[in-house]
Amino acid sequence: MSLIFSNSEGWIISHLQYLNDIYKTARDGSLQCRLMFNETLFEINSQYLRQNQIIRGNQQEEIPAQNKNRKRKRSKLLPDEDLKEINYVKQIFDTIMSLAKTEGLFSSTVATDNNEAARLASQKFYQETFSNEDGNFYGCNDTDVAIISSVENKKYVFPEKCSFYCYDVRDIAKKMELNNQYDFILLDPPWWNKSIRRKKTKYLEASYKMMYNDELAKIPIGKLLSSNGIVAIWCTNAPSHLHSIFNDIFPSWGVTYKAKWYWIKVTQLGDPVCNFNLALGKQPYELLVLGSVVNNNEINIPDGKLLISVPSAVHSHKPPLTEVMRDYLPHEPKCLEIFARYLLPKWTSWGLEVLKFQHLSLHTVIEEINEVQNSNTMDVNKLNI
């Protein structure tokens, strides 16, 4: 559903196509319908520029020639090991994109406006869905079809066979059975960082609660993961977080490192959303670090794979991994996402914002096929608010 290109070095994923596919059939009471995700949020048509970069770029066109020759402070290059990694990622990325573009997978012409429509759509979404209240509840959709239902007078869509918990991760041992049942556990931690801390005071609706690395190490992953299970954790490029995963978090979970993958964010043209940076600074990719139970040598996960996709303009809206992980998991795996912000079919999801991207305002009901007799509804008995 989400894979539009695949080879031995990586995949190109359409997050938008995946979202539309899983809601091809949905029920709203007695009505059967189809949902289309707001495609404006994926209209990433150019590299992201901050307002001060736009102003500076315009000013540079007017700077007299004699001023342009002033010496600038040189940025210190990254260590050789980091440069080698960046060059590797860029080389593989260029190879995959060259093949993809020959197959016509990306637009050849797009009006570049610094992603104005996507930015405005994201801002509107946050403003309309933001809530300071920490509601605790859990529920599930046991049916074989997506269901539209209300929670606290707001409408959400719930994919088939999903279950979810809206609780603090520190309560996971109190609410879930710790009997090593999950074949795949995915985490998208709210890593502590200064930019989000600044954003909390300026744009409260777009911020989230951060956690220190020693708190992440206390999550009982070892008691949730099956003996042949795989853990995957999204990570920024901050060396301190990577160091913590390898030396503190994974050992505390009883997990050993297996591989590191790279999620490359691209525009509709297929260009990286920012330049590959050889000095300290932002990169066009995030990391996915994978591990398995210590001393399990039967699990073989290739290193250095690339995941390429046009990102959502909504912060931390990660691409789906269901299909790319299929070759490394059992036929019908039990999957858990922690710090989840949206639901997946046949997955269990845990997070304080677990329904964030399930809000019906992100979708358009595009057709009502027919009325459904004796329609199934969500298991509201398990939805305790």
Image: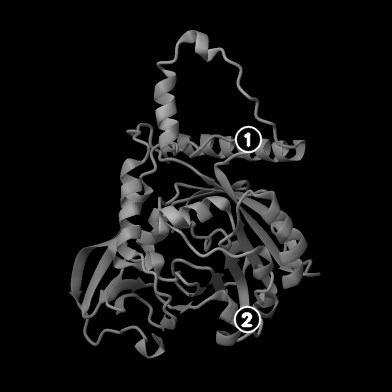
Residue 335 falls in image quadrant: bottom right
* SS type, badge 2: loop
The colour scheme of the drawn protein is one colour
Q: Residue at x 54, y 42 (%)?
A: 284
Structural crowding at the residue carrying mark 2, measured as other residues with C-alpha within 10 Å and reported as few (<14), some (14–19) or many (≥20) = some
Q: CA distance from mark 1 to mark 2?
A: 39 Å
In the image, what residue type sits under mark 2? Gln
Structural crowding at the residue carrying mark 1, measured as other residues with C-alpha within 10 Å and reported as few (<14), some (14–19) or many (≥20) = few
Q: Which residue has dot 1 on it?
A: 91
Q: Residue at x 62, y 46 (%)?
A: 9
Residue 92 is situated, as x and y percent measured from the top left of the image, at 62, 39
Q: Is residue 210 left or right of residue 374?
A: right
Seen from this angle, which residue lies furthest top? 66
Q: Residue at x 52, y 55 (%)?
A: 197
For the C terminus, which image quadrant? Answer: bottom left
Seen from this angle, which residue lies furthest right? 295
> Label for residue 181?
2
* SS type, badge 1: helix
For the N terminus, which image quadrant? Answer: bottom left
